[in-house]
Amino acid sequence: CITSKKESGVISGVQNSENGPIEWSKELPRSCLLSPGLRDKIVPLLAGLLECDDSKMWTFEQFFDSVTELLRCRLLHVFYINEGRELHAYLPAQATLADLKTEVYQQTSLSPASQLLFVQDKGLLEFALSCHSAAGQGLPPTTLSSPYLLLDAGCPRIQVQLGASAQTARFPVFPTPSVNLEQDASLAKSCCSVAHAMQRLLDKLCRCHAALRRAPLTLACVLEELVDKQVAKLSQARTMCTLLDQQLKLLLTSQSGMSQLVDAMQPQSQPAELQCLARCLVEKQDSRAAVSQQMAHLEKELGFLEQSVLKGRVLRTRWELACREGPQLAGCPETAATYVQKIRDSWQALARDKAARELSFHDKQFHTLEKNKIRQTCQKLLSLLQERCRHSCHQVAQSLEAWAKDALELLSRTKRVESELDSCMDMISSYAAALDKVGSTFESVVGGLVCDLKARCQSQGQNGLSLPKNAASDNAPSAQETLKDGVSGRPKKVPGRIVCGLQRLKEEQSEILELIEANHIMMRRLMCIATKSKNQNSESIKLGKNISFLNLSLPPLSNEES
């Protein structure tokens, strides 16, 4: 009757009074322990099963397909640092990072652009995902104790949201010291239920506390890795700039030498191509100045980041010091489990007393003792939850908020430097391409000038390049005693004694090479003779010494001796 009167899509209802109206809802009640991520998957399934309209009611095939799809989903745990709460994302097996960010946005309203997802002790999820993708895997697996860490890149505020249940959690109070078996058993059962709920909340707080303590170390590791890569990239850019400076200097020197050569060969007639090349080189000098200015700015920025992040590991050391001074929650889950078990044992004892209906005087004393044990244990569990665990989480959140403010500022600065560094690398690449183009132009211009000069020399019937009249001399040096300067192209006279010395050195080197070759052949022959016998070996060595002393040559070996 109830399901036939509800509207389409309604899956739950609450009746606050007997025979009163029912408050229908298309969502699961707040008391449901399912995570929000799983609720979104379960609600359509329940709506299809509880549909009262025959035309909208699900068939068995639809139900089977929906359940099969739900069972194939992967569970990914995400810890939202800014709110201190756990998220559960149920995604397909081949889900991507974009799918995960979309699911996180649906549960937190945090835009994907502002989401910073970390893998504990492995850095950013993007980097870890690239390694898993290379190995043919999807998103890295997670557990409840080792989730992804989610941080809002634009907001350093950290506030642990425990919900109203953590602040208003109270145990029922036994009204009178007198013995009331039914009432005492009922209240003890309620105390046991509240104790289990508090234990779940306390375990959640302990996981939250552990995640908040580990998150800064992961973020510090990410910053150190990013700055290390940027320093290496800047060093690479600096090396490229040095090589390009050498190339530009060589082009300038060659262009100057070619201009001087053209002036010497063709006075007052500078080719237009050479003038255009000179202007291009001047422009490249301006480009080099712009690159140098950008490099100086990047060196200053990276120097600050290196000093703030890498030198002494300032962020890591600062957080480790804060953790040492903060409270610890080691052993709290085990203590809570012990308290809950004691409350449960006392409830079982009161339930047995209720079943007995009549108690002796001594049994009544034990009954009262169990009630006092429940009251004291409940108070200890409540104190452990609110005064120790909740207080510790809030204290860690405050320390993390102050730390995250500086860390996020450094991260934003690191991203800005990364963008500027990429822009600088693009500038260097364009500058290198332009220098290569100028080098090719210079080569073609020089080739054209050389061809023109050769054609002119051939037309004048000369053997070499003709010198201008004002540079000619009657007593010009011979071809063996002249060298051409690689820069100006003008002949330079070499002293005759140097030429004679070089010739003698060449002859001596030829003689030395001939002697070395003859000595090598002689040693091979001696080694072959030594293999015959020991006596012949000694005679051969003696003969070899005599031969080397008398500067004689041995006859060639026969095939038998070889």
Image (tube, helix red, strand yellow):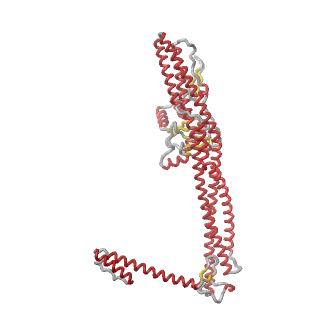
Residue 377: where, in percent of width, then height? 54, 22
Q: Residue furthest right?
A: 268
Q: Quadrant of residue 252?
A: bottom right
Q: How many marks?
A: 0
Q: Position of residue 316 (x, y in %)?
A: 59, 44
Does the rendering let one see residue 423?
Answer: yes
Position of residue 485 measured from the top left corner of the image (x, y, whole percent): 62, 78
Foreground residue among 541 and 136: 541
Q: Is residue 273 above or below residue 481?
A: above
Relative side of 499 to 285, left or right: left
Image quadrant assignment for residue 388: top right
Q: Nearer the viewer, residue 125 or 381?
A: 381
The answer to whether residue 39 shows anywhere in this view is no
In the orientation shown, which residue stands out farthest toward the bottom?
474
Give above or below for 501 relative to 57.
Answer: below
Q: Quadrant of residue 498?
A: bottom right
- Residue at x 48%, y 80% (from the top left corner): 509
The quadrant of the picture occupied by the C terminus is bottom left
Q: Position of residue 137 (x, y in %)?
A: 48, 46
Against 40, is 283 above or below? Answer: below
**Is 453 or 527 nearer to us in this picture?**
527
252 left or right of 93?
Answer: right
